[in-house]
Amino acid sequence: MNRVVTLEIEADRVVAHFPGHQAVMALARQVSAPLADVRSVEVVRDGWDVKLGWRVGGTSIPRRLAFGRFRRRGVRTFAGLYCGQPAVVIETSGGDWDRIAVCVEDPERAAAQVRAATGLDAAA
């Protein structure tokens, strides 16, 4: 895959970078959350299984893709998801987003990297 969403650790934040057309669909080039606010990191088999709620900004095509801002029962999610592709879901306890859910090239590696940076892997 090329031109995919990437998750990176930058200083004290986890940052999702959206390249090219994905930035246009998401209406953002990047979103981030403080590492100190990360409560959990999981990998889901299919990005479409993430319950997003109502789209409040961005692009969504049913059973295809969801990029941008979503709300469901007060939960604010920033998504970069494709149907049928695994995704990393990061839950936080504060900040701009309650969840960041993105499909990345290697979701297991990305999730492990975020867990290690937050110290969540030591709790397991």
Image: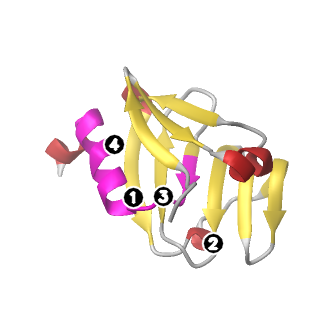
Mark toward the start of the polypeptide (4 vs 2)? 2
Residue 68 in the image: x percent, y percent?
74, 48
Q: Which residue is mark 3?
A: 104
> What amino acid is found at the position of numbered circle 4 in the picture?
Val
Residue 74 in the image: x percent, y percent?
71, 44
Task: Classify 109 as above or below 44.
Answer: above
Mark toward the start of the polypeptide (3 vs 2)? 2
> What amino acid is found at the position of numbered circle 2 in the picture?
Trp
Of marks 3 and 4, the one in the foreground: 3
As measured in the structure, the alpha-carbon distance from the residue carrying label 1 to the one carrying label 2 is 14 Å
Instruction: Assess whether mark 2 and mark 3 are in contact (beta carbons under 8 angstroms).
Output: no
In reply to whether residue 116 is colored magenta, the answer given is: yes
As measured in the structure, the alpha-carbon distance from the residue carrying label 3 to the one carrying label 4 is 13 Å
Identified at 73% across, 74% down, the residue is: 64
Residue 119 in the image: x percent, y percent?
22, 36
Residue 93 in the image: x percent, y percent?
49, 34
Residue neighbourhood size for the residue with mark 3, other residues' Cα within 10 Å, grouped as few (<14), some (14–19), many (≥20)? many
Instruction: Assess whether mark 4 and mark 1 are in contact (beta carbons under 8 angstroms).
Output: no
Residue neighbourhood size for the residue with mark 1, other residues' Cα within 10 Å, grouped as few (<14), some (14–19), many (≥20)? some
Q: Which residue is mark 2?
A: 48
Residue 80 seen: yes
Q: Which residue is mark 4?
A: 114
As measured in the structure, the alpha-carbon distance from the residue carrying label 1 to the one carrying label 4 is 10 Å
Left or right of residue 1, residue 35 in this image? left
Residue 42 disc label: 1
Q: Nearer the viewer, residue 58 or 73?
A: 58
Mark toward the start of the polypeptide (3 vs 1)? 1
- Magenta-colored span: 100-119
Kindly state the secondary structure of the residue where label 3 is placed. loop
